[in-house]
Amino acid sequence: MLTQRHDAVLDSGAGLLSPEDAETALRSAGLRVTAPRLATLSVMAENQHADAETLAQGVRDRLGAVSRQAVYDVLAALTEAGLVRRVTVDERRSRYELARHDNHHHLICRSCGRIEDVPCALGHAPCMDLDPARGFALEEADVVFRGLCADCAPTQPPHVV
């Protein structure tokens, strides 16, 4: 069953997310407030673009014994509720960030995996046009730029697209 996506903005500021803000966002999204969910949001606020294993380790550091599967389940629920955004690095790897609903995009380095946020060039969602004849009411577009970061570019041959 799909839950309704929530557009709460979880602003981590300088890597901090208050427990009160996290609790409010969870309740507003129709999710129960649980220790693993609160810990996952807190770890994510400190580690934007972290992979699931990094997040799971951070949750275990805070709570003790928490299974990897429990953290994956929390990530799925938070993503479905719109509190977390999943960034697909490649066919095997994903990273996660707090969903700020600010219409930003990502640069991903093909060599080291570094991810950087990039503001939308148009400044409004969706930032890509779709032929109206398709019959879709477009709400968002995920844009990912892939290439080599400044640190990796000198060491790698150019990739032809």
Image (tube, rainbow, N blue to C red):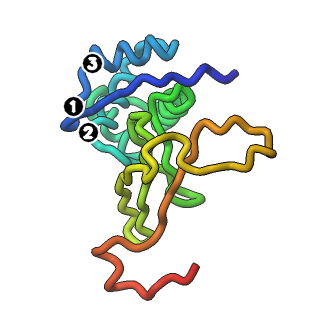
Residue that numbered label 1 is attached to: 16
Badge 2, how many Cα within 10 Å: few under 14, some, many 20+?
some
Residue 68: image location, x then y, percent? 46, 38
Q: Are marks 2 and 1 in contact (CB under 8 Å)?
A: yes
SS for dot 2: helix
SS for dot 1: loop
Which is more toward the observer, 118 or 87? 118
Looking at the rendered structure, the kind of residue marked 1 is Leu
Looking at the rendered structure, the kind of residue marked 2 is Glu
SS for dot 3: helix
Q: Which mark is residue 116?
A: none
Against 112, residue 136 (above or below) is above
At x 45%, y 13%, the residue is 28
Residue that numbered label 2 is attached to: 46
Q: Which mark is residue 19?
A: 3
Q: Are marks 1 and 3 in contact (CB under 8 Å)?
A: no
Residue furthest out toward the bottom:
157
